[in-house]
Image (cartoon, grey):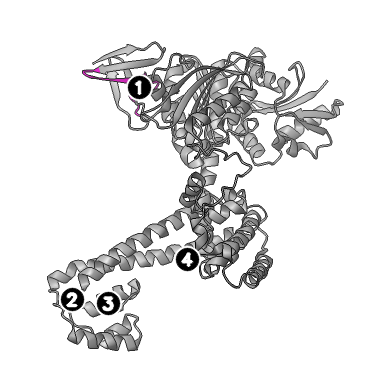
Amino acid sequence: MSTYLVPTPFGVFVHNEDCRILYEVIVYPDEELATKMMMQIADKTLPVEIRDAIEAARQAGVNRIVVESSGLAALIRDLNVEVMVDNASRAIKMFRTSIDSVLIERGVLESEQQTTDFRRRVALGISREKIMRHLRSPDLTIKYAVETIDSLDKTINLLGMRLREWYAINVPAIVNHVEDIQTLVETVLSVGTGMPTAEHLVRAGLPPEAAKNIVEETAQEVGTPLSEEGLKPVLAIAQSIRTMLDARRTIEEYIEKSMSRVAPNMTALVGPLVGARLISAAGSLEDLAKKPSSTIQVLGAERALFRSLRTGAAPPKHGVIFQVPLVHSSPFWQRGKIARALAGKLAIAAKVDAHSGQDLSAALRLQLERRIEEIRRQNPRPSAKGQPEKQQQRPTRKRGSRGRRSRSR
Amino acid sequence: MSVHETNFPGVYQITDGQHTSLATRSLVEGQSVYGERVITVGEESYRLWSGRRSKLAAAIRNGLGELPIRPGSRVLYLGAASGTTVSHVSDIVGPHGVVSAIEFSPTVARGLVRLAESRPNIIPIVEDARHPDRYATLVAGPVDVVYQDIAQPDQARILYENIRHFCTIGTYAMIAIKARSIDSTASVKRVFDREIRQLMDRGLEVVERVNLAPLERDHLMVSLRVVEDV
């Protein structure tokens, strides 16, 4: 005859095969206590109520207990009783569906309405707590931060183009020679309506040599000075770009700080920004830790990946991790291999960051460097396989083991 | 403007000139949950229920023959999201029914929790529907209907796991299958057949299938009934 343990919002029950309650620890009507107990189970810590119920059972000679979930089993493993997990136990299912009426019959609960109400309030308490924790989790803000950086970059580029175009009426030479948006903005703001002097330009961050060229060129260029009035909107754009650049720096610093705390190993491999992008693409650090390295390798290249699945085109070699200099500055015939090696180490780093928090960054980096050296040594030049001719043959379709079998569409 | 109860208890049809739309009688007077129109007729307020916002409404619009969710039902709702459809299910089952609403994403579940605060028949649960054992004790008593709208590749398996935990012979299941979430390359029909086959092999019987086009592309609503011991 088996003995079963079932924690419910009303308390912890130990019952036998016929659903007769042998021992119980009732927490009803203490809603707060019930919520706390259920939260503890979810957090994998042992609530005292379960300990007490098992203790009572053990003293009465019960030495084997059946529970429904493996999480619960792990909690009571150390309590000197044999624990068995039966994921779809009939007895427990029957107990769960009859407990309400049993408790009402015994007078512990008054009515069905009251039962549902208590259960609902406990569920609400648990849900609120879970949502609050999620909102407090650092990966969420990292995700928002990195998404905001992407939006800022887009906006800065767009407005930068407008600024260039507009200010070119005044001083075309500046626009042609100043590549960097930050420098352009500073130049525009300090030069204003007048003609640029070398001093202006150097203060805005240009090298003296370039400044001299611009001043000389400006003298010969065709430009019409903008009026005070006409310059106002241009300065306004420059101002707002400056503000956005400042915001971008603040956010980047924030990401650097959070990432070195939340995911030190990933940060060591790919830097804070790419690490943050990976977390954001996966949803959270924990989600990323569950992904295989092959998925991490192409995270962010979903469009190419699905195109390849649909049409049989070559699959993408890299997604977000392309942004790592190690990958994008390597010659094309090594990139795929390097991306794969990096993704492998990243998969390990993400798991360590999510679950243990140890710092293995030095070892991971070293292993990766060794592997990359090896790749470079073994592939000094493009192989026949990597040559463009290959693109013309129809790539043979790999049939994975995961059921992507359809050819017909 | 006129209000008629449809063949399904708790589901109403509101006719206004040329337009007809579905509606449910609001459990909370005058409440608009997600921006839907609320129409007050006499003492009662009705919340319009658009097939564009809710797959269950789309299924009814597209000729669903039987709606197992009725006043007094105990419903297990998997994939509750922010509670759009859940709010109408809560209206239909009324004060004597219960909706246990499971949603995994805490961000999305905020809307659900807000909804549950105003409605005594919704039990909100922020958990992964893949693991019914983690929320088994929060789901009230025996379940009459499992409704599932989870865009996951293993949605048939998830449904079955929940049925195994909470249901017995005679329980209904409604499942919205999104072909593109299961296999992005296979033909839609084949995906539907494969998912339904999986459930039939596990002791469920198909009651009916309703295609949700054109309100939802590549979606199928399937009603099933548990006919074997689970």
3 or 2: tag closer to the N-terminus: 2
A223 or A308: which is nearer to us? Answer: A308
**In the image, which disc is placed on residue A170?**
2
Disc 3 marks a residue whose amino acid type is Asn
Q: Secondary structure at mark 4?
A: helix
Q: Could you say which disc has been placed on residue A253 in the image? A: 4
Is disc 3 in contact with disc 1, using a CB cutoff of under 8 Å? no
Crowd class of label 1 (few under 14; some 14 to 19; many from 20; radius 10 Å):
some
Pick whichever, B15 or B120, lies toward us.
B15
Name the chain under label 3. A
For mark 1, give the secondary structure.
loop
Q: Please, what is the three-letter code of the amino acid marked with disc 4?
A: Glu
- Disc 1 marks which amino acid? Glu
Mark 1, residue position? B29
| Labels 3 & 4 near each other (Cβ < 8 A) | no
Q: Earlier in the sequence, mark 2 or mark 4?
A: 2
**Mark 3–mark 2 contact, CB under 8 Å?**
no
Report the Cα–Cα distance between label 3 and label 2: 12 Å
